[in-house]
Image (cartoon, rainbow, N blue to C red):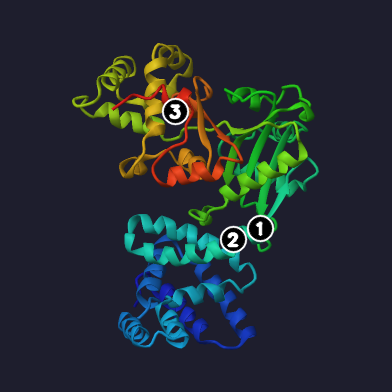
Amino acid sequence: MARGGIKVTRLLGQCAKLLTERGQAVSVSLARETLDLYAELNRRQQIGFFLGLLDEFSPDPQAVLAAAQRYAEEPSAERLSELHKLAEPPRQELLRRLNRAPGGTAAILRMREHLLQAARENTALTAVDWDFRHLLSSWFNPGFLQIVRVDWRTPAYLLERIIAHEAVHEIQGWNDLRRRLERDRRCFAFFHPALPDEPLIFVEVALADAMPNAIAPLLNAQAACGDPNRATVAALYSINNCQPGLRGVSLGNFLVKQVVELLAAEFPSLRRFCTLSPIPGFATWLAARLRESLAGRPPAAGRGLEAVVRELGTDLSKVAADPAAALERLEMLRDPLMALCATYLLSAGPEAEKTRDPVARFHLNNGARLERINWRADESKRGLRESLGMMVNYVYEPSAIETNHERFVHDRIAASRQVTSLAIAG
């Protein structure tokens, strides 16, 4: 019996039956029944099912090797096609057939969300996840996606989805949302034809006359509305992925580039496209440095770390417990913390990739330049907990995007002199 019990055994048998069915109508019906069976599984049974996909729906190594040898001896299109068919895991075709069922795409996204959780406990499932990601990358190719401006006229059920999925800067009700959709603001979302009622990813933008250095003014629901036609800066201040099942499927970079193009066309006065971004990995990185021995560190780094330890200790999680007191203590550490943050953001190479800030990776890989580190830019508990209150501006210059992307791929980071001068040498 398969791991997970009778339900998993029955489901895997249904999957095998679905793969052998040739009739289109029957295949759709079987796909729907298969997804219904999956929906009944608990977490333990889901893991058993994914292990079954690994064990029973992988390629036959001997058959693949024999086909590869035949292709090597006779490199014809026919031999290559044979090799391709034998090398492709049968579970890929299974997922294609499941996708034919009504609601199949949404069900597969939920399935992958469960798979990602299971793969944390069993790394062998990475092979199964590769197949999911491979197919989802094709199905959610940006060429199939539609970019939509979200405004106050957008249907209420979609606005509710925006409120629910805002994970960077929580939306405090309808009045807050309405301010974020005023004429000096923009919100754009990607939609897929198979999921017309679910945004995949969305970005919020503020149109202003200067690059923002703090998040509170942008989130102030009572702030006066500015004239967007006089704005010279478009600041992307919140980017949210709405579908956990699409993790690792690149959508954000295409969204950012399209948003820049749309805004440039709508507002010729815009001269700069930037972000006001969190630094969610900084406090974790710094806490690890504080716990390590300071021996062997460059003198400047050593002194900076020593100052932080004296004032805050090594448990930075306590900083957010009392924001008012924390801000007063942090002010005395402004210079060393800014230097340490710049050092963190500018770290490159294989070792840095393990700890690199996820937001920094996203924007730098998209071709942005690290422009400015802003002190006390986010004084919320979350901002203090993640980055001791600091935020970053990344700048997108359309003419430099490709060059900056190439630099990042080769472990070089595009950054302003203002940031590089802060970093600790060594």
Dot 1: element: loop
Q: CA distance from mark 3 to mark 1?
A: 34 Å
Q: Which mark is residue 387?
A: 3
Q: Nearer the viewer, mark 3 or mark 1?
A: 1
Identify which amino acid the numbered label 3 is placed on.
Answer: Ser
Q: Position of residue 155 (x, y in %)?
A: 77, 48
Q: Residues at badges 1 and 2 in contact (C-beta under 8 Å)? A: yes
Dot 3: element: helix
Q: Which mark is residue 145?
A: 1
Identify which amino acid the numbered label 1 is placed on.
Answer: Leu
Of callouts 3 and 1, the N-terminal one: 1
Identity of the residue drawn at 35% across and 74% down: 55
Count every numbered label the image shows and give the total: 3
Q: Position of residue 22 (x, y in %)?
A: 57, 88
Q: CA distance from mark 1 to mark 2?
A: 7 Å
Q: Position of residue 174 (x, y in %)?
A: 72, 35
Q: Residues at badges 3 and 2 in contact (C-beta under 8 Å)? A: no
Quadrant assignment for the N terminus: bottom left
Q: Residues at badges 3 and 1 in contact (C-beta under 8 Å)? A: no
Closer to the camera in the image, 263 or 321: 263
Q: Position of residue 392 (x, y in %)?
A: 51, 29
Q: Residues within 10 Å of mark 1 (few under 14, many from 20)?
A: some
The residue at which mark 2 appears reads as 140
Identity of the residue drawn at 32% across and 29% down: 287
Q: Is residue 34 left or right of residue 227?
A: left
Dot 2: element: loop
Identify which amino acid the numbered label 2 is placed on.
Answer: Phe
Q: Is residue 180 above or below residue 311?
A: below
